[in-house]
Image: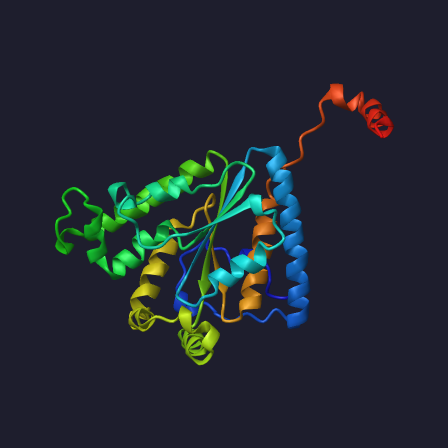
């Protein structure tokens, strides 16, 4: 398939979002996309079983994007073949009262995947340098020393946050967490169409909120802060991938392929060898079970 090299999606140099495509022609039909996606997710499921037996790595999938970018449906479609115990999805909403009693990364540490498993962050720790930059008054809820008003939130404050996030990701990657971060890159026009569909189709009305329109009016700010966050935090151990997402099936396929190819780089993830004492007596155990009728 043309245009599907994952290295073309990875952020290794500074990017400008408005110069990156939100549509990618893979040169295949929608039916073939569905077939390829099914193949990829079956391979991912098998690999997760192997990773569970290996018991040294876990995988953190971070998904970010504007409203309607398709995060929920992507999670459903990419991970549907997984053993339900092999993947846990966390949707981070507005911090609770208890969460605000801790630093902003605390709740994300608690949600990190166990060895052998996946965790999917549907919205992530990056909300703390995205939504809070668009709405800096939210920072005041965190009760941070020396931050008493919005005027105290200086550019140096955000630089420190980027440093903290980079340190967080470096620490967990050094302890066996494979980190893959995806920005679902949606055009403003496609978002408009998806919001209209929420209004036009009764079964989707519940998804719509007037707040969606208020946030849409801040599109330029969000794009600016997404761009800065991605450029400051895409690292070899925690790369960002920009996924053209105007077509949901294309986005799902690209994410699944990227995950599969990246985890395949870890050649040491193998099923453990059978203990010698068991291997030497395997025929004996088989005979015992065959006689046990």
Residue found at the far front of this picture: 293
Where is 21 relative to 173, above or below?
A: below
Side of 3 relative to 170 (left or right)? right
Find residue 219 and report its horizontal and vertical position in percent. Answer: 33, 69
Name the one closer to the observer, 200 or 234: 200
Q: How many marks?
A: 0
Side of 168 relative to 265 (left or right)? left
Instruction: Say which residue appears at 75% left-offset and 22% top-offset.
Output: 278
Find residue 169 and report its horizontal and vertical position in percent. Answer: 41, 42
Task: Point out the image quarter for the C terminus.
Answer: top right
How are the colours assigned in the image? rainbow
Instruction: Say which residue appears at 38% left-offset and 71% top-offset.
Output: 208
Q: Quadrant of residue 99?
A: top left
Find residue 50 and report its horizontal and vertical position in percent. Answer: 64, 39
Q: Quadrant of residue 266?
A: top right
Find residue 93 and report its horizontal and vertical position in percent. Answer: 35, 55
Q: Is residue 29 visible?
A: yes
Task: Point out the image quarter for the N terminus.
Answer: bottom right
Where is 141 relative to 1, above or below?
A: above
Instruction: Say which residue appears at 80% left-offset and 21% top-offset.
Output: 281
Q: Quadrant of residue 52?
A: top right
Residue found at the far top of this picture: 277
Instruction: Say which residue appears at 38% left-offset and 44% top-offset.
Output: 108
Residue found at the far bottom of this picture: 200
Q: Is residue 8 visible?
A: no
């Amino acid at each position: 398939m043309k245009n599907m090299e994952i290295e073309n999606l990875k952020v290794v140099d500074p990017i400008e979002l408005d110069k990156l495509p939100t549509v990618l022609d893979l040169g295949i039909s929608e039916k073939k996309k569905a077939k390829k996606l099914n193949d990829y997710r079956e391979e991912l499921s098998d690999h997760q079983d192997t990773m569970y037996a290996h018991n040294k790595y876990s995988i953190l999938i971070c998904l970010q994007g504007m409203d309607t970018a398709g995060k929920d449906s992507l999670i459903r479609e990419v991970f549907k073949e997984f053993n339900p115990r092999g993947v846990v999805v966390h949707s981070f909403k507005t911090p609770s009262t208890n969460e605000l009693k801790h630093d902003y990364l605390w709740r994300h540490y608690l949600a990190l995947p166990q060895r052998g498993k996946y965790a999917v962050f549907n919205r992530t720790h990056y909300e703390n340098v995205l939504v809070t930059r668009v709405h800096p008054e939210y920072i005041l809820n965190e009760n941070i020393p020396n931050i008493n008003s919005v005027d105290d939130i200086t550019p140096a404050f955000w630089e420190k946050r980027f440093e903290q996030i980079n340190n967080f990701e470096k620490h967990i990657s050094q302890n066996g967490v494979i980190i893959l971060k995806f920005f679902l890159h949606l055009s403003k026009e496609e978002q408009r169409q998806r919001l209209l569909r929420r209004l036009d189709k009764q079964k989707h009305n519940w998804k719509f909120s007037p707040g969606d329109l208020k946030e849409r009016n801040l599109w330029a700010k969000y794009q600016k802060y997404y761009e800065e966050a991605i450029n400051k935090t895409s690292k070899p151990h925690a790369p960002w991938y920009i996924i053209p997402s105007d077509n949901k099936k294309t986005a799902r396929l690209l994410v699944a392929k990227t995950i599969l190819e990246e985890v395949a780089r870890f050649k040491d993830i193998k099923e453990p060898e059978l203990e010698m004492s068991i291997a030497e007596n395997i025929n004996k155990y088989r005979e015992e079970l065959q006689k046990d009728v």
